[in-house]
Amino acid sequence: MSVVSRRRSDQSRLRTQLIKQLVRKDLKIKYQGSTLGFAWSLANPLLMLVVYTIVFTVVFKNTVSFFGFFLLSGLLIWNFFQMSVMGAATSITGNAGLVKKVPFPHIALPLSSIGFAGVQVALQYLVLIVAMSVAGLAPIRPELLLLVPALVVVVTLTLGLSLLVAATTVRYKDTQHILEILMFAWVWASGVIYTPSLVRDRLGSGLKLDVYYLNPMAGVTATFQRAFYGQLYGTDGKLILASDSVWFYLKVLGLGFVVSLVVLAIGAMQFRRQSADFAEDL
Amino acid sequence: MTSTPLSDDAPVLIRAQGVGKRFTRFHRRATSLKERVVRREQGSRDDFWALRDVDIEVRRGETVGLMGPNGSGKSTLLKVLSGILRETEGSVEIHGRVASLLELGAGFDGELTGRENVYLNSALLGVPKADTDALFYEIVAFSELGEFIDNPVKHYSSGMYVRLGFSVAVHVDPDILIVDEVLAVGDAAFQKKCLDRIQDFQRQGKTILFVSHSSGLIEALCTRAVVLGHGRVIFDGSTREGTDRLNELMGVDRVNRVDAGYAKIAAVAVVDPSTNETPESFTTGGEAMLMADIDWINTDTLDGNDVVAELQLMAGSGEVVVIVDPQPFHVPAEEIRAGTTSSLRWRLRALPEILGDVTLTLTIRHGDVLIASANLPGFRVRATQSLTTDGEARFLTRDELAAIGRTSVQSVDA
């Protein structure tokens, strides 16, 4: 290995280590106050599961069996996206003291917001898997492999948007308020809360549907629902998930990936351009 | 011989050429996306050069002392050299690993224990975890924290905080150590230990660049001195001559200065708040009140939300320097009107133990731009016990002003 590339790998190892430390700090600060500690973040999805299952099987009857499982399959990955981006938005401004006094790679701050969200959501998925297994619906199916491309897409998008908003918030303080509104609209546009077959019923399966899936989160949540929840048909025998074909998921993830790459390019450029002036602009 | 003068063929580790740093204050610059969209124009701007035409070379093994009055650009230069701020013009080259100590414990998080903060801070300073593991016990021993290392640092005294911050920083093993006034804190014994550690660094042939107000310290430690004044290098050479130039400069700065014609500090005094008189000395742990009248001269281009008054206590006794720097105080926007006078009262509670005479410096800044300053030499605090300091500033109400026999105008409740 040449000296230059060794230096570079040392650099990235140090950066990874810094991100780990920052994530550990955030986790500790978040959970040390409560006696239940970490169990809280795990109890949270269980509680949601119970409430949504009751609401959508008793109160609003519908054709989706185990509505709670369906909902959480897509909602948790949405939560990862939203928590990461919202956390990244204030990651630079919230660490102003650090940025102004200590020279370090600023990118570690938004990255640690993503890591922080990632650790929690990964554990929440574990809880979901355990709960589904207990209910006899253990998500063991070949479609689980679809999670690999889906994760690539969601991480690319999350990274790009996180970098963009982290840099933008330094100059424009209202970015996070705009983001909150945007996220609220976005979750409804991403087929998290309703079944994705409703979208197909409305848009058909042509160009309009492709345009819909330019939203990377729509493809990602649809794929997560396919992989975890996996019940293709409702109690009336109609398709409730996005598709029964693996190729469909690969196609929409491909669309989402192209869009995510564009977002990442813009976010990384913006972050790089502005980060040298963070200490001054804060 | 390993002592000075250093050979000219030692490699240059820090090279700054024609470095300038401009701070720009935008009046009514859009601070939200909404404004940015609604209003296209950017408003007027106000440029201030904190550094201009700075040329500095530091070779391996040198210890360079950076001196200059308040607002001369020392801290800005350190920030530019350590990569926190980007130079506006010129170029900066750094060869080797830099550890900059601009503020001890700057990366500490109050909720974490000392131990966790050691690891976090080391990671921030770019130390591999394995190295931190290996040095951990040495770091704790140096900080003298003992079992407190597992308590959250929010429960630490300021002395403990500083000791841990310095311990981490000096164990980083950099090629270049950049240090701002951080030695000004901690008790005498710990300061001695820090200085010993810095001398170890020198013996190992490391390069050090550090800021101090203490001529004694600069002369004792440094191989060279650089004096800054108004953002320019006005001297670069022997420490002896450097401190002489600094004293000259401080003498000039001691008079009230009107920098840009915005405001003038018309009167300033320090009194004992219980008697309203200036005693010969103040008592440690006691109170002192700074009274100042500020005449506003030209306020057209001042942004009322950005004018800040700041107070520093500086003591130089031999090689020990103490700086007390309470929170800067925002001057209320309504106060700032050309042709009027504002009365500022600054109450310093629980005065710290400071040896010798103190110079009290009041500065009025508009953002980063110094618009007026006044120095009050000969403020003396008699030591009784060691305490921490905090400062509180507010404008007196009309009634309170009347009660102490003043009729200054334009006073509001803080």
Image: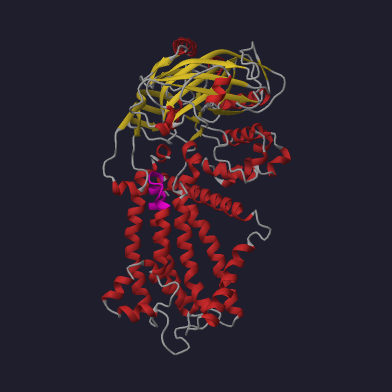
Q: Is B355 situated above or below A173?
A: above
Examine the rendering and report whether any part of residue B2 can be seen. Answer: no
Specify the segment rendered in magenta: A163-176
Q: Is A78 situated above or below B282?
A: below
Of the pair A211 and B365, the residue shown nearer to us? B365
Q: Position of residue B329 (x, y in %)?
A: 50, 30
Residue A174 is a magenta residue: yes
Of the pair A267 and B337, the residue shown nearer to us? B337
Of the pair A242 and B198, the residue shown nearer to us? A242
Task: Examine the image and state in which quarter residue B359 appears.
Answer: top right
Residue drawn where x is 38% and y is 52% of the image: A164
Outermost residue on the bottom side: it is A237
Q: Is B202 situated above or below A60?
A: above
Residue drawn where x is 61% and y is 13% of the image: B277
A168 left or right, relative to B114? left
Residue drawn where x is 69% and y is 58% of the image: A35
Q: How many marks?
A: 0
Residue B269 is a magenta residue: no
Q: Position of residue B62 (x, y in %)?
A: 48, 23
- Colouring chosen for the image of the structure: secondary structure
Q: Position of residue A148 (x, y in %)?
A: 44, 69
Examine the rendering and report whether any part of residue B123 can be seen. Answer: yes
Q: Position of residue B211 (x, y in %)?
A: 50, 23
Please tell me whether the stretch drawn in magenta is mainly helix, strand or loop.
helix
